Image: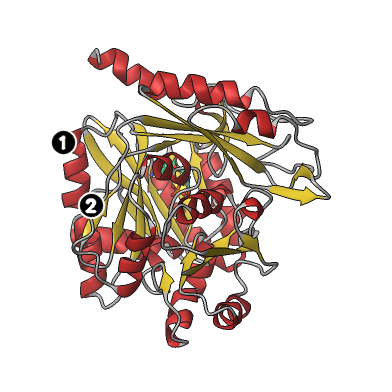
Amino acid sequence: MKVFLIGGGGREHTLAWKIKQSPKVEQVFCAPGNAGIEQIAQCVKISSDDIDELAAFAKKEQIDLTVVGPELPLTLGIVDMFQDEGLRVFGPGKDAAMLEGSKAFTKELMKQQGIPSAFFSTFTDAQDASRYIQEVGAPIVVKADGLCGGKGVIVCQTLEEALDAVNLIMINESFGDAGRKIVVEECLQGEEASVLVFTDGKHVLPMPSSQDHKAVFDGDKGPNTGGMGAYSPAPVVTPALEEQILEEIMKPTIRAMEEQGHPYRGVLYAGLMIEDGKAKVLEFNCRFGDPEAQPLLMRLKSDIVPVLEAIADGDLSGIELEWDPRATVCVVMAAKGYPKSYKKGMEISGLEKAGEMKDTVVFHAGTENSGGKILTDGGRVLGVTSAGDTIAEAIDLAYSAVEQIHWEGVHYRKDIGMKALEHRHKTGD
Ligand code: AMP
Ligand code: GLY
């Protein structure tokens, strides 16, 4: 069969790598792709949010299954549009993707369903929001309602920061329409983790736990990024907690979406804060995480294509997943300056040597092939991912591969996976 993948980041390179391994697949196309995806798929220069062009391409090439990576086309309604055109597609429809597309919608849904989350209020008026913030005090979190490319959440330690955040979002309109409404919520403490499930709207197939590293610098210092590295499994998510997350968070959310008339089909991603053995939802995403997809899909032993097809066709019953018991770690290598402004076009060396290392895959994110040279073409450039019998072994392998790779100004965190090691020490594993 012919598979069409939408997107061009590290998550999509990982999906392309996994889909390509399926005996069912003859050809993979990807729009727009990157220099890594280009080595295993045919890339087409269509932007991932140009849903009309994407549908025209899928029709012309008689694509058997389209897989949507990023959130923007999902919230724009790519899935509804493809389905209307008779095209088979993996991902939630526009109304279901609201779980990521509108934080106010999701907070209301969680409140109605009693799903554990931070307490909150929503506002459409800056003065009302500022008054509320002065009443409840800091620390507090100010969130733009809509999609802001990961920049719309401001965790404020002081009242002043929180009032500035309201100004930034509502008065300066820094995120445009996405900030017409805001959510102001309690600042939760604890350790974060990500739990993702496959669902057809009724049946739920959980993936193992993982953990992202959002802050740019070691020790979770500095501004938030799209994610500087991830690993799986995350020991903070104990088996008991996994059960709580499934029963008290995932299943009620999926059930509520169905009851409200927008069944959720695809990957549902819960960003969680864990404190004293209890999980609360920070956010939902309507897709695979990036970089969580890298360590997770490296652990997935089963063919992913029948899973994606079953969800696209609306019946996941009868599908089982087999996971590699080993641990995996992904270290993101980023351009100088990221997550602020950065230069593109730096030549990357050492890719081949790193790629030859055992149990290691160098997933590309922002890269471009220019006449055979691989150049940086984004903020997050590579996700070097390794598997090991223990998390410590996977960390060592990933960093020895990272050390082979160089470009001017490259930076990466040196402590990816360290929190997992701390848990192991605490529990004596
Ligand atoms: P989100 O995009 O909603 O996941 O938010 C991005 C990051 O902001 C999260 O990964 C957390 O680090 C932080 N964050 C979001 N909401 C809260 C909260 N209520 N309390 C503390 N930190 C939060
Ligand atoms: N790793 C965070 C995200 O994919 O949103």
Mark sitting on residue 409: none
Q: Which residue is mark 1?
A: 240
Q: Quadrant of residue 128?
A: bottom left
Distance, label 2 to label 1, CA atoms, is: 13 Å
Residue 54 higher or lower than 411, as above or below: below
Q: Nearer the viewer, residue 297 or 332?
A: 297
Say whether residue 137 is visible: no
Q: Farthest residue toward the bottom?
A: 85
Task: Inspect the image, locate mark 2, and give the three-letter code of the amino acid beneath it.
Answer: Ile
Residue 427 higher or lower than 290, as above or below: above
Q: Which residue is mark 2?
A: 249
Report x, y in % for residue 16. 52, 54
Q: Farthest residue toward the right?
A: 371
Report x, y in % for residue 286. 41, 60
- Of labels 2 and 1, the one closer to you: 1
Task: Inspect the image, locate mark 1, and give the three-letter code of the amino acid beneath it.
Answer: Ala
Q: Secondary structure at mark 1?
A: helix
Image quadrant holding the C terminus, namely top left
Report x, y in % for residue 3. 50, 67
Residue 194 higher or lower than 44, as above or below: above
Identified at 62% across, 47% down, the residue is 365
Identified at 61% across, 78% down, the residue is 57
Disc 2 + disc 1, Cβ < 8 Å: no
